[in-house]
Amino acid sequence: LLIYAAQLMRQGIDLKSACRTAICLPLTDDERLQETLEDLMDDLF
Amino acid sequence: LTTVSPHPLDALRLADPDTYVWVKGKVELMVPPPGASALRLLADQTIWGLSVETAMGTALARGILDLLPCSAMPRLHRYVQMVRRASDTGITLGRIVAEFSAAVVSAGEPLTRQFETTMAVMLGKGTYALRAPFEVLRELLQAGDLVSAAAYLDLLAAAFRKDLTYNQSLQLVYLLPKSVRRLAARRRHFQIEQLTAVVTVNLRLVDAYLEGLAKGAALLDKGALRRFVSQAMERFERKAELGIKFLSLSSKVGQDACLALQRAVPLVHVNGQLSRYLQARLGYSVRLEPLSGLGGLAAEIAWVCSDGQSIYLPDEVERFDRRRRNIGFYKFLVRLEAALFECRTFDFDLERAADVHPGFSEKMPLAMPLRRIDGMCDGEQFVRAFPLPLLAGDLFTLYEHARLGAFLRKQYPGLMRQTQPLLDAEARVCIQANASHLLAPVALHLLLSRQAPFSTDPSTADLQRELIALFDPSMASPLGVETSAFRACLAYARSSRWYAGSQGRYRPFRFPHDRRLRWELVSRAMSVHDRSAALIQQRLEEQGLTVYRSELRNRLADQQGRLSAEDVTALVLSRCAAARQPGTPVHLSSRQLDKLLQLSGLERPPTAEAPGDAYRYPEWDNTVQDYLFDHTRVREAEIPVQNGAERYQRILQRHGGLVSRMRHAFALLKPEGITMLRQWPEGDAVDYRALLDYVMDRRAGRMPSERLFIKRLKQERDVAVVVLVDLSRSTANPAAGGNASVLDVTKEALVLFCEALQVVGDSYAIAGFSGTGRHSVDYYHIKRVEEPLSDAVRSRISYLSPQRSTRMGAAVRHATALLGEVQRRVRLLIVISDGFPNDLGYKADYAIADTRRAVSEARASNFHVKAITVNIGSDPGLDALYGRVHHHVIENVRDLPDKLLRLYGTLTRF
């Protein structure tokens, strides 16, 4: 997933969108966990 | 000749010596002492009251005594006048006024006039309407809430002015005070105002309004609640039922409207989300607790604090005008506070500080090595070692927060960017609150990256620059909390000289969001493991092994008080590495360690275990939203087989009719062997009815169905069931409508159940559970799955007896684990209990959350879990425990045998 995220970034997708698409969404479809992952991403970028 | 003037209370001594002693005792405690005229009034009126009725005299004396310290003579006269006037109407009324009006009179006008008007209205219904409502009025006045008291008087007047039947009036007499007493002080006055509005429109709305408050409308602020209630009124005018559902938040429209107006966010609403965030960021759980849980300390803490195990947050946040922003503020606090855990602030260790910073001991005003004070963590000891502990504490917080800030900026740039607006706003507050404080420009520079003007005094300004220079951000991240303590030592030496020179008294610094390190809380939270760690450390030192107490404490906390020889080796090497010393070889046999632990009082010597296997299961902790691993210990126990099973036979005889009826009903459940499936696309014979339809359809020119076959299936019941019986002490209570206990009736149900299942041939097990504490959950096998219904089983059922408490989660997990080994298409777990789970450290929401989790786990493993609760009325809490459609409440336990069999039949019918 990290490699996919990196590939998206190289194609010009912004960091957050790339991580959300390639890492967060494939990991879980639980809305609450998505929110937690989103919070962590907000911390990082 | 000299004449001694008589004491004003002398007359009372003559009239009633007992009351005199009591009154005199109260008067002597008053500072300043009351004047002679007031005392004379007290004596005269008490004597008059006693002459009417003893209780009246006492009430009057108490009322005047309450008024004496803070009221002038006119108020005393006003009070006496009110009581006298009421007594003219009747003694009971006089006594009530004497009891309750002192608090009103002490609040002054216009409340007293309002009280009189309201009382006149209420008297229209009768004297019985006064006492209960006035008790709450007195409570409000004693709490100093005059606004709510006035609103409450308005409410009473509005309610009792209406045309009421006696029953309606009586209901209001108890309902209104009870409801007002429950309201939270902060929003009480406008909630009462809206209750008045509701009462004025229609009494039917009162219950709906109170229900709505309990469900969430209580979080609305003044304007929002007014809008919400007026929306409900509009609906009520259009259609009464709509308005009631809206106001009681029973309708979705009502809930949505309330949520849209809601601004305040209670901690319970965001607890789960914040706990998940912490778990994800830190890799372990941290409890989130409400600040109110700290008791008296909560008043000192504005927003947030931590104690190394929990983060304490406000019970609710209403800082911003939008709900979303208030949720964001909770997140903001937790995000910043998490850094304390991430950077191991609470692992501060004085010995490590001395090892890492060789000059540390000389800078500290206490001698090293330390003589540790029991029950005090190293942080608290460090701060208290200085002559100005407040200054030392502030400096420690300052440099530690600066270190954490540098860490956050490096690791979480997004977090810092997002929190910047809140920090900027706080910077303005800090500048105002800390005007002319020595640390103000230092804190603004180090914590908020703001340039604040230095002091106009050149020497002070130099000192402030010096304090800033002590923090070198490039050194921040690799060094720990001990470096912050070292910097605090250096800064303290300079600052205390400045305070000594300026003759100024140290004023505590107000940190951004009032976030300071509160070591006294850390001491309290870690005291148990800290004490054990101190004892073990001392024993190890006697053997020449040195470890850091903080590391030892953490190891003990992580492993629930257990320690291995490998742990000791790792801790010794860790200390050697920190102190830059060569690793000392550790020679500690496990026997030596056991002895050492025993001497430290950490582990009990092994005791003889009762026979039976023990199993460990996790438990769900709803406060941290996580499992506590291996938290419970379930021990399989046997019920001793007694001679014979006469009781079993007696039950069978007593219920002979029901048994034969149930046997017949269950025989019908048994499949006949072969099931025929008609109109099947393939099969072993032609379905002639379908064939006939086929021909007819073709003739009529319609498209015929091609499902023309019959399939014969051999059908078998493939069911395994375990009945789990609660054997708690409460099952000894008598069942409703008879002398037999709940357990006796449960036994009857089990007997019938066994007999019925023998007919149908399903595999089944019966087990009981009880216990005390998490280490001792007893699981009694009454009948194992593979065991036939023997005399031994009958005897065990006969001799079941109430035991101790109910730790239901662990029992459900064990039953699930045992039945999980049985391969069946349908697996069923039936729990028979007489109430909610309850055990040591296993109460209320915690117990419900764990049991619900255990039931969910069982369902996830393909079990059907059904619960039967007996001998209590229906309770919404049971929905939370088992799920809305998965439990049955049987108020009369005598229905249990019949209901159990019916339930079983319904659940397993194919």
Image: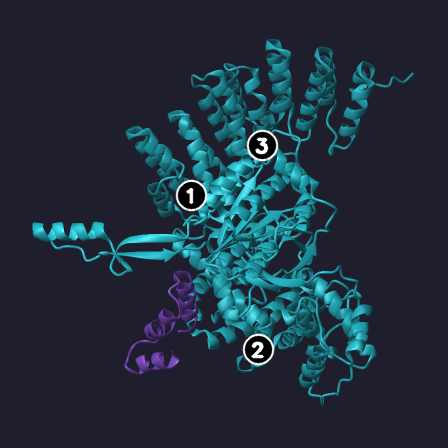
Residue B624 place in picture, x, y as percent: 55, 60
Q: Residue at left 73%, top 25%? A: B35
Q: Residue at left 57%, top 37%? A: B872
Which color has been applied to chain B in this rendered view? Answer: cyan
| Residue B141: image tag | 3
The answer to which image quadrant residue B390 occupies is: bottom right
Q: Quickly name the residue at label 1.
A: B220
Q: Residues within 10 Å of mark 1 (few under 14, many from 20)?
A: many
In the rendered structure, the residue with mark 2 lies on which chain?
B
The answer to which image quadrant residue B163 occupies is: top left
Q: Residue at left 61%, top 29%? A: B737
Same chain? Circles 2 and 1: yes
Residue B66 sits above or below residue B342 on the image: above
Taking the image as drawn, is residue B198 in sight? yes
How far apart marks 2 and 3 lie (CA) works out to 53 Å
Residue B304 place in picture, x, y as percent: 55, 58
Numbered disc 1: secondary structure: loop
From the image, which quarter does the N terminus of chain A lie in? Answer: bottom left
Return the disc, 2 or 1, that comes first in the chain's sequence.
1
Q: Quickly name the residue at label 2.
A: B471
Q: What residue type is labelled 2?
A: Phe
Which color has been applied to chain A in this rendered view? Answer: purple
